[in-house]
Amino acid sequence: MERDYHDAEWGEPVSGEAAWFERLTLEAFQSGLSWRTILAKRPAFREVFAGFDADVVAGFTEADVERLLSDARIVRNRAKVTAAVVNARAVVALREAGGLEELVAAYRPGDAVVPQAQTTSTESVALSRALKKRGFTFVGPTTMHALMEATGMFDPHLYDCHRRGVAPEGGAG
């Protein structure tokens, strides 16, 4: 499972609001846990968060939060579940300013990032601040650095990894 994720998805660019909202949400849920746990629960996360449709999740009520907290198929952490709903509302509000994807892309690291040598960067700190200013929660600098790695904002693969420098489909390496 983890190897498949690494070889096929980790470090690959994503596009579209739902894909970015999913990655942002899953990175928040992963905080303090193993990525293996999140990957195993990912199908259930996709189901209970309506395919990460921000409009649907933004409409979740306290009853929906309680329902999610009773679902053993996902991580049942009130702060993280609440953050997903709060962040969905922030995603919807951000559309007027270009959207989540555009905002995150504005913080793409300009300098070469040494893969897995750091857990934050100047850009992840700045992105965290920008998102918090717009009402997002559970978007600390370490979580945003992990988001940047996972979504290919820079090549996160170690220098001796077979995926290092491999161009995403249709892109340049």
Image (cartoon, rainbow, N blue to C red):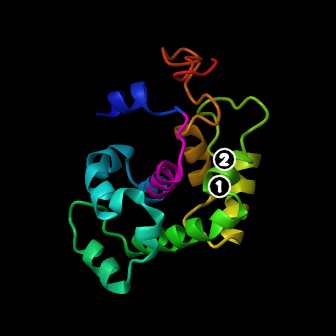
**Residue 80 visible to an observer of this rendering:** no
Amino acid type, residue under disc 1 in the picture: Pro
Q: Is residue 63 left or right of residue 123?
A: left
Residue 167 placement: quadrant: top right
Chain part drawn in magenta: 13-25
In what element is the residue under mark 2?
loop
Q: Earlier in the sequence, mark 2 or mark 1?
A: 2
Residue 100 placement: quadrant: bottom right
Instruction: Give the image location of residue 147, x and y in percent.
Output: 56, 46
Number of residues whose C-alpha sits closer than 10 Å to that of mark 2, classed few (under 14), some (14–19) or many (20 or more)? some
Instruction: Give the image location of residue 123, x and y in percent.
Output: 74, 47
Q: Nearer the viewer, residue 111 or 8?
A: 8
Q: Residue at x 56, y 45 (%)?
A: 146
Relative to 14, residue 157 above or below? above
Q: Residue at x 53, y 53 (%)?
A: 17
Instruction: Give the image location of residue 157, x and y in percent.
Output: 55, 25
Relative to 109, residue 112 above or below? above
Q: Is residue 78 left or right of residue 10?
A: left
Main secondary structure along the magenta-highlighted residues? helix
Residue designated by label 2? 120
**Residue 27 visible to an observer of this rendering:** yes
Relative to 43, residue 74 above or below? below
Instruction: Give the image location of residue 43, x and y in percent.
Output: 27, 50
Residue that sits furthest to the front in the current view: 96
On-image quarter of the N terminus:
top left
Q: Is residue 60 left or right of residue 132?
A: left
Q: Are marks 2 and 1 in contact (CB under 8 Å)?
A: yes
Amino acid type, residue under disc 2 in the picture: Thr
Residue designated by label 1? 141
Number of residues whose C-alpha sits closer than 10 Å to that of mark 1, classed few (under 14), some (14–19) or many (20 or more)? many
Q: Residue at x 56, y 68 (%)?
A: 92
On-image quarter of the C terminus:
top right
